[in-house]
Image: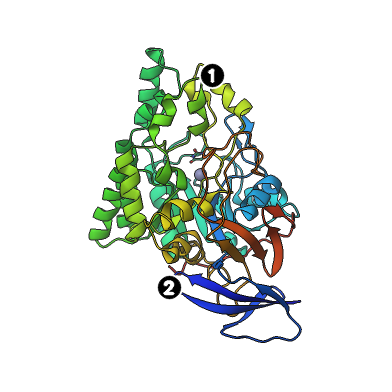
Amino acid sequence: MKRLLKGGTIVNADGRMVADLLIHGEKIEKIGTDLVCEDAQIIDVTGKLLFPGFIDAHTHFDLDVCNTTTADDFYTGGRSALRGGTTMVIDFACPNKGESLQYGLDLWHKKAEGKTACDYGFHMTIDDWNDGIIEELPKMFEQGISSFKMYMTYPAMMIGDEAMFKALRKMKELGGIAGVHCENAGVIDALIAEHKAEGKLEPSSHPECRPAVLEAEAISRLLKMAEVADVPVVIVHLSSEAGLREVEAARKRGQKVYVETCPHYLLLEDSKYSLPDFEGAKYVCAPPLRKDSDREALWNAVRNGVVQTVSTDHCSFTLGQKAAGRGDFTKIPGGMPGVETRGVLLYTFGVAENRISAEKMVEVLSTAPAKLYGAYPRKGVLAEGSDADIVVYDPNGTTEITAKDQVCNVDYAPYEGIKTAGHISQVYLRGTLSVDEGEVLLDRGGQYIHRGRSCL
Ligand code: DUC
Ligand code: ZN
């Protein structure tokens, strides 16, 4: 099957051009002006922007957490991703402490296989450190896993400084990359105990117990460990200006540091936690939402290349699940939906409001995650030979974000009522028309993507 997309503006991270794009099977065969192909279906995309399919390198589908399971599994989460122009997610395989990495990986394959609308890969969570895990690590690379996740908070998953340092050393030896959740666990626990003792049990206590300085402290500590281990690291879901300053200081020392932030840190503020009627629970996530000044600092950091990727940390719970924390904010399951709206939000508040160029949007949503996580140039670029993962974006259209409209399995939308600048007309997944005007046409077409080592 051949399709010829004619007259669109092809936007890559390094520039744009009006051109035709020929799809043959699953790949982009040719890009050029005035292409002719007798046996191709001709599709007029004049006036549309063509982006490489977005890659969300931070999702949590079908994850058991806080005595419940995330509302989205790979079926609902994958559909939601694809509808939002995300043609590949990288989820976190998450063995429990005491389980092998292989057990965790097999389990995540089982959760995703045959169920997922978009392509997918897995980061491997390291929440323990022992001889078994050390032996297993090379086998992860053989199976397409080149990136790992470690936590400096959450007792069920965190590892201490000694294990963290040893794991970083191993990353250096094997050529892997670690993404780290940076918050100071001990001080957070002490602040939570203080709040509980004072009877401060509402969602408004959540950001007070996880202040930005405790993110900055953990980032600083991690980066010093990484300096000694002599290895690059990724700071995942960085939320604060104070955290950015630590990254800049490390880069001045000559370190290679990658930074991911999320749409909610760019667009929402901690005043949400003070909404009446337990509404603040919708926004409970870790790290928490910050101040206006943090948002501005993060937008500047995206524009200036201080931040490399924008992914979602999609970790969704229904209002019923969030209600477990009525009367005790520490029992509110942490996380928000996001995978369906990342592209339109970045376009609306980034590109249309002149904070970033469309090329920068492509870089942070697609090209940089593909390079950082070893899927480039198969993914992350509109180029001959790459997968025909294409978002056809109508800059003159609009959509209203509502809980009712979204296909993720959640009964609220953090961005309820926002009217987007432009909208997604079509999404192609490896050459197949998979979303058309908001309708998901292909539910289970996603494949596991075997990733190599980082090339960013
Ligand atoms: N933060 C969240 O809010 N949810 C899932 C994991 C995380 O780090
Ligand atoms: Zn996460």
Q: Which residue is mark 2?
A: 14
434 vs 164, nearest the viewer: 434
Q: Residue 133: tell me if it is visible.
A: no
Residue 433 at x, y percent in the picture? 71, 64
**Residue 235 position (above or below residue 271):** below
Q: Which residue is mark 1?
A: 326
Residue 214 at x, y percent in the picture? 32, 36
Q: Amino acid at mark 1?
A: Arg
Locate residue 242 relative to residue 265 in the image: left or right.
Answer: left
Residue located at (58% from left, 23% from top): 323
Closer to the observer: label 1 or label 2? 2
The label shown at residue 34 is none
Q: Tell me whether the residue at label 1 lies in contact with that at label 2, contact meaning CB atoms closer than 8 angstroms.
A: no
Q: Amino acid at mark 2?
A: Asp
Of pointers 1 and 2, the one earlier in the residue sequence:
2
Q: Quadrant of residue 363?
A: bottom left
Number of residues whose C-alpha sits closer than 10 Å to that of mark 1, classed few (under 14), some (14–19) or many (20 or more):
some
Q: CA distance from mark 1 to mark 2?
A: 48 Å
Number of residues whose C-alpha sits closer than 10 Å to that of mark 2, classed few (under 14), some (14–19) or many (20 or more):
few
220 vs 283, nearest the viewer: 283
Residue 274 at x, y percent in the picture? 42, 24
175 vs 345, nearest the viewer: 345
